[in-house]
Amino acid sequence: MIALFLALAAAAERRAPPPPPPPAAIDGLPIAGLAPQALPARGCSAYLFSAGQTRALAVVVASDPAALRIALDGKVADYPRVAQRGTGDYGFASVTDYQLGEVTLSLDMTVVRRADVTDGALVPSATLRIDRTGKDGIVLPLAGLIGCAKEGASG
């Protein structure tokens, strides 16, 4: 019986197509889509998708440790939080600033709790502003959801 179960599971695994690769660029911007990301081991993470013509996982924001992950100029990097303003939820402020080197990111997001979302919440709208020394600024509309580790889901 166990052998039959393992054979069926192996056959199903062979039939499942691999996930599509993330896009090389989002709407012609110097931002690439991120590969699928795991839920956090502790705290919560916001998984934010581009809301323009190209739909891709553009940003992952962790509450613990407080950092924003983005693929900018061909490099995936985690930008640490440097400031936050306003009330928020699930370990996130309504406006949060991140910085690494000459790149400053400002994330403004709305978090909405819903009874049908377990261990997380929705982010119906967000805006990421990217400022880089010597380059034009970028404003990227986003939307997504928050997923939490079991211990971090209470907000």
Image (cartoon, rainbow, N blue to C red):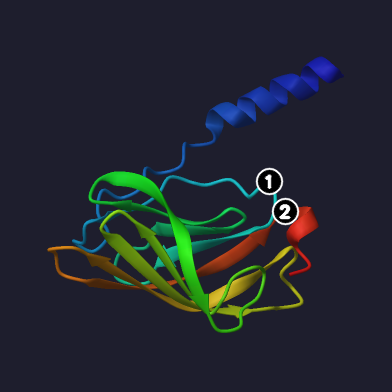
Quadrant where the C terminus is found in the figure: bottom right
Task: Determine the residue located farthest toward the top in the rendered image.
Answer: 3
Q: Residue 149 has which mark?
A: 2
What is the secondary structure assignment of the residue under circle 1?
A: loop
Where residue 105 appears, x then y in whole percent?
36, 66
Left or right, 111 with respect to 2, comes to left
**Residue at mark 1:** 41
Where residue 5 appears, x then y in whole percent?
78, 24
Mark 1 belongs to which amino acid?
Answer: Ala
Task: Determine the residue located farthest toward the right in the rendered image.
Answer: 1
Q: Is residue 136 above or below residue 151?
A: below
Give the residue drawn at x 46%, y 65%: 82
* Along the viewing direction, whichever of 20 and 42 lies nearer the viewer: 42
Mark 2 belongs to which amino acid?
Answer: Ala
Q: Are there few (<14), some (14-19), or many (20+) residues within 10 Å of tag 2? A: some
Whichever of callouts 2 and 1 sits on the residue coming sooner in the sequence is 1
Q: Is residue 68 above or below residue 1?
A: below
Determine which quarter of the picture holds residue 123.
Answer: bottom right
Q: Are there few (<14), some (14-19), or many (20+) residues within 10 Å of tag 1? A: few
What is the secondary structure assignment of the residue under circle 2?
A: loop
Where residue 107 appears, x then y in whole percent?
43, 72
Where residue 59 appears, x then y in whole percent?
43, 59
